[in-house]
Amino acid sequence: MTPSDAELADLARLRHAAETYARGADRKDKDLWSAVLAADCVIAGPGFRTEGRDAVLGLIDTLGQMFRATLHQIHQVTATFDGDTATGETYCIAEHVLKDSDTVLVWAIRYQDQWRRADGAWQFTQRELIVEWEETRPVTVTAGAPAGEQET
């Protein structure tokens, strides 16, 4: 079935939310995450489940404690719409530079997403992070600030 023009526009907005979430993670920017997370959002993944926007924002601090830098690359976003809610899947490759070695940990991720539109903006109400596989490899960290600390 061919999506309607309205669904295509909403799909682009969902993708934008996923990209904003990724940029927020990489830049350790809680304001970016706040813009795309519903107050009652739930983020879950291997070994963790965090409920509520305020608690979820704390995960940015956890990322900063675990990794020198991250780089999340968003790929396809698919969704099914039901009025002001949507359910779908977002593919992502996430690279994490480890704190204690010049090693990058790469995750192939499928987010199982749920969104809600409020005041014209789509926000995540739930994200389940499924790691399909991981890879580690040496990396050369160049001079300058880690990606999470660079000016934008």
Image (cartoon, grey):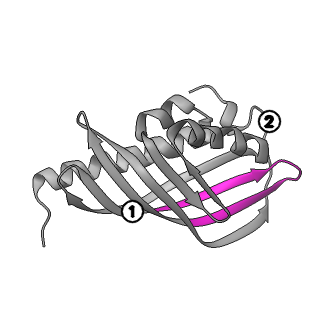
In which quarter of the view is residue 78 placed? bottom left
**Residue stretch in magenta:** 91-108
Q: Residues within 10 Å of mark 2 (few under 14, many from 20)?
A: few
Q: Is residue 96 above or below residue 78?
A: above
Q: Residue at x 51, y 39 (%)?
A: 53
Quarter in which the N terminus is drawn: bottom left
Where is residue 3? Give x, y as percent: 14, 63
- Of residue 43 and residue 51, the one placed in the foreground of this image is 51
What secondary structure is marked by label 2? loop
Using the image, tell me which numbered label, if any, was put on residue 143: 2
Q: Is residue 52 found left or right of 78 in the rendered image?
A: right
Is residue 35 or residue 140 the one in the foreground? 35
* Mark toward the start of the polypeptide (2 vs 1): 1
Instruction: Say which residue label 1 marks.
Output: 76
The amino acid type, in three-letter code, at marker 1 is Gln
Instruction: Look at the numbered disc 1 and give the secondary structure of its residue.
Output: strand
Q: Quadrant of residue 77?
A: bottom left
Q: Between 131 and 5, which is closer to the camera in this rendering?
A: 131
Q: Position of residue 130 (x, y in %)?
A: 55, 68
Of the 4 image quadrants, the one containing the C terminus is top right
Closest to the observer: 9 or 142?
A: 9
The alpha-carbon separation of the residues under discs 2 and 1 comes to 32 Å
> Which residue is rendered at x = 67% and y = 36% of the image?
148
Can you give x and y, in whole percent of width and height, for residue 66 in the image?
Answer: 77, 48
Which amino acid, by three-letter code, is at mark 2?
A: Ala
Q: Tell me if residue 19 is in the magenta stretch.
A: no
Image height check: is 47 above or below 141? below
The number of numbered badges drawn on the structure is: 2
Residue at the location (60% across, 62% down)? 45
Q: Main secondary structure of the magenta part?
A: strand
